[in-house]
Amino acid sequence: MSKPAICGGTPVRSEKIFYGHQYIDEADIQAVVDVLKSDYLTCGPKIAEAEEKLCEITGAKYAVLCSNGTAALHIACLAAGVGAGDEVITTPITFAASANCALYCGAKPVFADINEETYNIDPACVKALTTERTKAVVAVDYTGQSAELDELLTHCHENHLVLIEDGAHVIGTSYKGKKNGSIADMTTLSFHPVKTVTSGEGGAVLTNNKEYYEKLLLYRAHGITRDSAQMANEPDGPWYYEQITLGMNYRMTDMQAALLISQLDKLPMFSARRKEIVKAYDEAFSQLPQLFVQREIPESDTTRHLYILRICPDKLTIDRKRFFEALAAENICCNVHYIPTYYFPYYKELGYEKGLCPKAEKLYDEIISLPLYYAMTDEDVQDVIAAVTKIVNYFSK
């Protein structure tokens, strides 16, 4: 017998639905099997093939695959020349890697507040925080909606800064008719299983700048080159290579690249379904004054990675924590994206304190990430809507 829900009665669902899940079909499985039967498990032809496909999809001139989205951010900062004493401006409403990438390079993360309706980094705050020590801006496309790239690019280039677009959420999105990945100085991607497309783990950096591209290749693979034009000495045989800078081992395997290629074939299908689900959510939740629906800027044709439900606490008798628990009792398993980065103990030890970004902090207190992924059925979507509506009606003031 079902356990009664917090709002009374039986739960909306008898089985749990999770906030995100990968979609793997037989084509994906066969793509990986084919590599396992081939001569190359890593450093093989699938890497270049996947990079070429990313360029084709996004319009970027160059793509560099790497082991994950965090590695992509790290080598993007290195390619941008971020180093000791520099500052890198980013948002606190993101995964920690968006700020950690500055720390990896010896630089200081500086947190800019958000637009309280779109939840993306506020260009006005970026401008106000720019100093002579600022080297780069890491602008996160939160939930998959594009950051305001034109304004950020103009500011960065006027001040000789590098704009790194943290596009972990953004694949499939367009900004002013151009695919994200072809606009910023560098754009990083993530292919974690809950993202729109997956390679298991994996990431990439996209750029139109050949100088950045050549640096990214080095930083991805130990700083080692086989290009004689980059070497200090004459090669003494076909086996010869040189380490010319300090890099990491951030390579992706051919197995992951093969899965990515197969997943990218389904990107239009994934994108269309996510838009359908978001539309259904928006239409339902915009009718409830106890909730706030994230505003989308008209410049962004968004493929959402996350759907953010924001409650209005002054119109409910419960807070976000209790709302979250009520959804779990209805078998709707959600998440929260994100805890402001500077809340973490590690950042407190570095001297960061609450109060830096009031709009971001208020947002964190009021948001829940609802289920959003390709394989959700229409019934799944309606169950989520029913559960949210049930809770809102039960706890409405």
Image (cartoon, grey):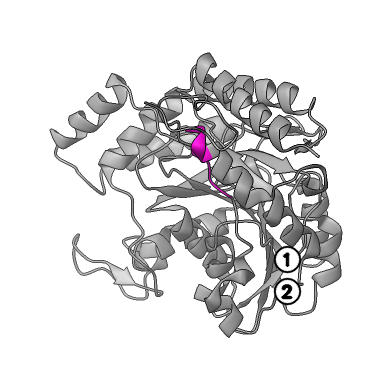
In the rendering, at what x and y percent does residue 110 appear? Answer: 70, 72
Q: Is residue 337 above or below residue 287?
A: below
Residue at the outermost top position: 378
Q: CA distance from mark 2 to mark 1?
A: 7 Å
Residue in view at x 42 percent, y 24 percent: 14
Q: Quadrant of residue 226?
A: bottom left
Going by the image, does 114 lie left or right of 85?
right
- Report the predominant secondary structure element of the magenta stretch: loop
Residue drawn at point x = 62 percent, y = 31 percent: 303
Number of the label disc, if any, that sits on residue 161: 1
The residue at 33%/50% (across/down) is 252
Q: Tell me if residue 220 comes above or below residue 194 in the rendering.
A: below
Give yes or no for contact between labels 2 and 1 (Cβ–Cβ under 8 Å).
Answer: yes
> Of label 2 and label 1, which has the lower sequence position?
2
Secondary structure of the residue carrying tag 1 is: loop
232 versus 79 height, above or below: below
* Res 169 visible: no
Give the label on residue 135, or none.
Answer: none
Quarter of the image with the C terminus is top right
Pointer 2: what residue?
A: 134
Where residue 152 appears, x then y in whole percent? 78, 54
User: Considering the image in quadrants, where does the N terminus appear?
Assistant: top left
The residue lying toward the viewer, choosing from 362 and 101, is: 362
Q: Secondary structure at mark 2?
A: strand
Asked if residue 168 lies left or right of residue 257, the reply is right
Q: Is residue 339 visible?
A: yes
Residues rendered magenta in the picture: 328-336
